[in-house]
Image: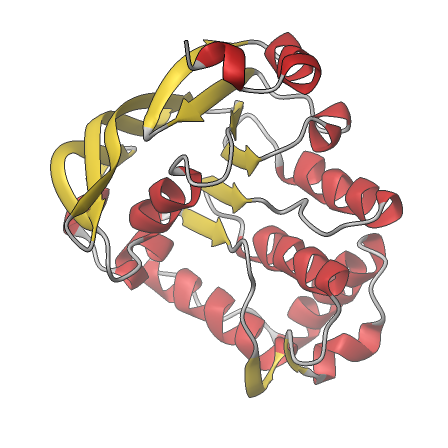
Amino acid sequence: MTLLDIVDLHISVEEREIIKGIDLQVEAGEIHAIMGPNGSGKSTLTNALAGQEGYQINHGSAHLEDKDLLELSVEERARAGLFLAFQYPVELPGVSNVEFLKTAVDSLRRANGLDDISTVNFMKELRQLVKKLDLDPEILKRGVNEGFSGGERKRNEIVQLLCLKPRVALLDETDSGLDIDALQTVARGIKEFRSPRTGIVLVTHYQRLLEFVQPDYVHVMLDGRLVRSGDASLALELEAKGYAWLEN
């Protein structure tokens, strides 16, 4: 089953075309890694798919299962099953992690005709996730990402991912700034999310995360285009050669 279907997508920012015609199909159960140098358009693609402001769709289409993503609001995209882990997770002072996640989970359940989850069941599941991701349970009482280290923010994004249970996860450089222990923890969370029902688009500069999360496909983005695709061995080739050999 195709979960995410992108066809000839062109995206501009401030009237400058950044994404110059991308085709990408993510089937259920697959992990697709997108690699490329700074400025190649990786974050533009994920941010635009998630519906962030400031991105102009010039041409092409993007569907999440049978839904036209480009016709949906940000909230509707989330309810349809799309999740974005930010490259730079933002702080939400005054909104605790517990409040934020309970509200989000209940909103998704209502959109699917379900009752709110009981606080007891929710807290039981949330504490288990926090423990799995080596986070201090006290963070649940703190404002979302408020005063968190870089590693705590990235692990907290994976807690959100596992709580919200989307169909497709867009993970934008979720490995940046992580030491090896935090990297392994984040990778463990990504692998736990992976299932025959979900799809993952994993944006990264480096091969090191892919040592722990084995992708089905690796794509190279240069100047707003996917110029090469292959299996996990392509990431090793990029690690050894860099990107310059693909620019010729």
In the picture, the quarter occupied by the C terminus is: top left
Q: Residue 31 location in percent, x, y?
A: 55, 25
Depth check: give the residue in front, 111 or 64. 64
Q: Residue at x 69, y 26 (%)?
A: 207
Q: Residue at x 19, y 55 (%)?
A: 14
Asked whether, in this view, residue 79 is left or right of residue 119, the answer is left
Asked whether, in this view, residue 208 is left or right of residue 197, the answer is right
Does residue 66 appear in the picture of this structure?
no
Is 139 located above or below residue 177 in the figure?
below
Q: Residue 184 location in percent, x, y?
A: 82, 40
Q: Residue 60 location in percent, x, y?
A: 14, 31
* Coloration of the structure image: secondary structure
Q: Residue 122 location in percent, x, y?
A: 65, 68
Depth check: give the residue in front, 135 or 224. 224
Asked whether, in this view, residue 44 is left or right of residue 238, the answer is left
Q: Residue furthest left?
A: 59
Q: Residue at x 78, y 43 (%)?
A: 183
Depth check: give the residue in front, 114 or 71. 71
Q: Residue furthest bottom?
A: 94
Q: Quadrant of residue 4?
A: top left
Q: Quadrant of residue 98?
A: bottom right
Is 245 located above or below residue 14 in the figure?
above
Q: Residue at x 33, y 61 (%)?
A: 111
